[in-house]
Amino acid sequence: MTGSAVKWAIRNTPAMNTVVLAVLIVGTISAFMLRREVFPQFELEIVLVTVPYPGASPDEVESGICQKVEEAVRSVDGIKKVTSVAAEGAANIVIEVRSDVPSVQKVLNEIKSQVDRIPSFPDLAEEPEVQQITFRNKAISVGVIQENSTAPDAELQLREITEQVRDDLLLIPEISQAEIAGERKYQIDVEIPEKTLREYGLTLADVSRRIRQRNLELPGGTIRDQGETYLLRGKDKRVLGEEIAAIPLITRPDGVVLRVSDLGQVRDEFMDTTSISRINGKPGLAIDINAASREDLLAMSDAVRKYVREKTLPPGYAFSIWADSSIEVRDRMDLLLRNGMQGLILVFVILSLFLDLKLAFWVAMGIPISLLGACAVLLQFDQTTICGLVEKSESRKRRNTFP
């Protein structure tokens, strides 16, 4: 079979020249259209269930959340192992799915459905979050640095500016994922002096309960009328400090209504944590831009750098860029091209010295034809650049050996 193909190629030289030229043209076009990334992306057969339970001890988290989730997901088909981690203020349940399951997404939906049916979570427990673990390649990190941090609301201003920068980055067509790292979660502080509480016969638990009762968003059923259906919903959810301050707490006999702001102070603050976010020794927040499976890493990096050059921050703030993965990708591509050129020249020179010049030329041409032909095949099968393809076998090994 091989001999027949060689004989046909020898007898049909013009046809083979046309094929070679087509491979060079199509391969060159494909090389510029290929997506470039550091490491191939893949999803693990692991589902993570997270349930925040503020203020609870690990024992309370275990009995109130972990054990109930384990009981609920036990009936789901396709689960290999369930590992629960009860920490202070949160429960994390790691569910490993068997590798022979045809659809991890189906198992994920079943787990989410079973968790949503649990009726007896503690009252203070927040909504559970069910997600499949997916590794994302970080493309680049952008930091917003605050030069002057002496203002009383400096951290709030830094957070607002960083969120605005993140929203601007998400509007760029080349970017679909940008997350703020190292930020503290928002928290509304309500402070009422003990003297005031005693004066009105209140406790902190009473204040908390009354605020919670008047800060709700609940479904109210439906109304059907001659072919039309109206959904009823009570919306009184308050997310800002000034809105919480307007909640009525006490109605006096003379009809005067005392609100939260009349008894104490309400401030928009952040949760108390032991972490400090600094960039180059100054207060700052980082924005991590991650590459999705269909995005080109070099295009993302160029778009981010262009945005940083053109964006003007308010006085007292500056940008910083680090962890640019495009540098490593460009180095790999340059190494590939440099080695290819050196090999081509070396083969051509050696064969020219000891063999025919025409034979040396066609043998040396095998290098660019092979590389460009591989680029055309990679583009056809929706693969990434060669530097990423080299590591795909390692990613599969890591996937199979994940603990």
Image (cartoon, rainbow, N blue to C red):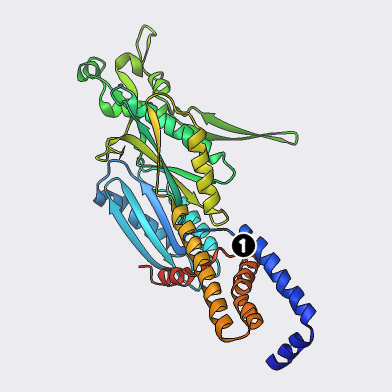
Does residue 212 show up?
no
Q: Quadrant of the N terminus?
A: bottom right
Residue drawn at (70%, 93%) of the image? 3
Q: Residue at x 55, y 82 (%)?
A: 353
For the C terminus, the quadrant is bottom left
Local SS, label 1 = helix
Residue 81 image offset from top left, x and y in percent: 38, 67
Q: Is 376 situated above or below 167? A: below
Q: Position of residue 346 (x, y in %)?
A: 52, 75
Residue 317: image location, x then y, percent: 39, 29
Residue wearing tag 1: 31
Depth order, front residue of 334/326: 334
For the point 57% across and 77% down, the residue is: 348
Vertical order, 266 against 372 (above or below):
above
Q: Quadrant of residue 145?
A: top left
Could one spot residue 17 in this view of the protein? yes
Identify which residue is drawn at 64% across, 73% down: 369
